[in-house]
Amino acid sequence: MRTDGRQAGQLRKVSIRKSFLKYALGSCLIEMGNTKVICSASLEEKVPPFLKDKGRGWVTAEYGMLPASCNERIQREASRGKLSGRTQEIQRLIGRSLRAVVDFQALGERSILIDADVVQGDGGTRTAAITGSFVALAEAVEKLMERRIVRKNPVFDFVAAVSVGLVNGRPLLDLSYSEDSHAAVDMNLVMTGKGKLVEVQGTAEGHPFTKKEMDRLLVLGQKGIRELIRIQSSHVRLP
């Protein structure tokens, strides 16, 4: 048993509240244990310069941790005048993950902007942000179809993410902060509803790990993502 009473292959308690924000085109509050992230989607009737006049859309993301989201106050990056390397990496990861399940021709020449704001962090903020951002994106697309702005649903599959790691030699699913800080191997997985991997981020914090250990973590992570997609599917319908 782990410090919070879970089994090795058990997710933290997951809660998704769709339509969490009044003014957003799509939004949700996702809670995974003590990690809480507000995800929202907004529409812009334009695309980046490299896509102009090509009839294709775009999906991009911004990520941030609010000042009181952790034990010690986090300084707003806007006040420092630049984004940290970690923030830029996570923003790109969220964007890549969502773009893996979007048909840009069906979206048309417009952009959907995702905002993922961590209001409370206890490990797995980037993976929770991806899982929640998909729900916000899907809701935004539902509304675009209702308003006949897009004719065909550009979202063709689910996508979700989870962390796994080796802690004291044991493979664990969905690491809390205390587990993540003691993990010998830390890995984040992003996977679609059809079981295809979008991204695998794995790092040895101590000793190098074997392919056998990596395979065990992949199997554990795939199991967790299937559970997350099942939860997403109670809020999102795809064609």
Image (tube, helix red, strand yellow):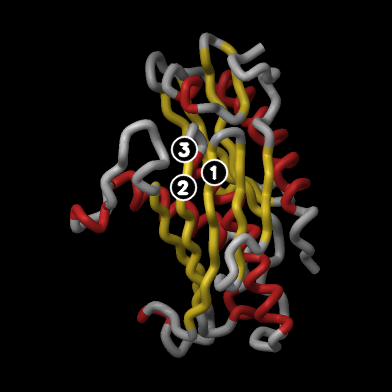
- Residue closer to the observer: 83 or 226: 83
CA gap between label 2 and label 3 equals: 6 Å
The earlier-in-sequence mark between 2 and 1 is 1
Q: Residues within 10 Å of mark 3 (few under 14, many from 20)?
A: many
Query: Does residue 44 appear left or right of residue 104 in this picture?
Result: left
Tag 3: residue type? Gly
Q: Residue at x 54, y 57 (%)?
A: 39
Does dot 2 land on a helix, a strand or a loop? strand
Residue at figure coordinates x 59%, y 15% from the top left: 3
Badge 2, how many Cα within 10 Å: few under 14, some, many 20+?
A: many
Residue 36 is tagged as 1
Badge 1 amino acid? Lys
Do the residues bearing badges 1 and 3 touch, measured as CB atoms within 8 Å? Answer: no
Measured as percent of width and height from the top left, residue 170 is found at: 59, 13
| N-term-proximal mark, 1 vs 3 | 1
Q: Can you tell which mark lies on residue 118?
A: 2
Looking at the figure, which quarter contains the C terminus? Answer: bottom right
The answer to which quarter of the image holds residue 190 is top right
The answer to whether the residue labelled 2 contacts the one labelled 3, judged by CB atoms less than 8 Å apart, is yes
Disc marking residue 121? 3
* Circle 2: residue type: Val
As helix, strand or loop, the secondary structure at mark 3 comes to loop
Q: Position of residue 131 (x, y in %)?
A: 61, 49
In the rendered view of the protein, which quadrant contains the N terminus?
top right
Q: Secondary structure at mark 1?
A: strand
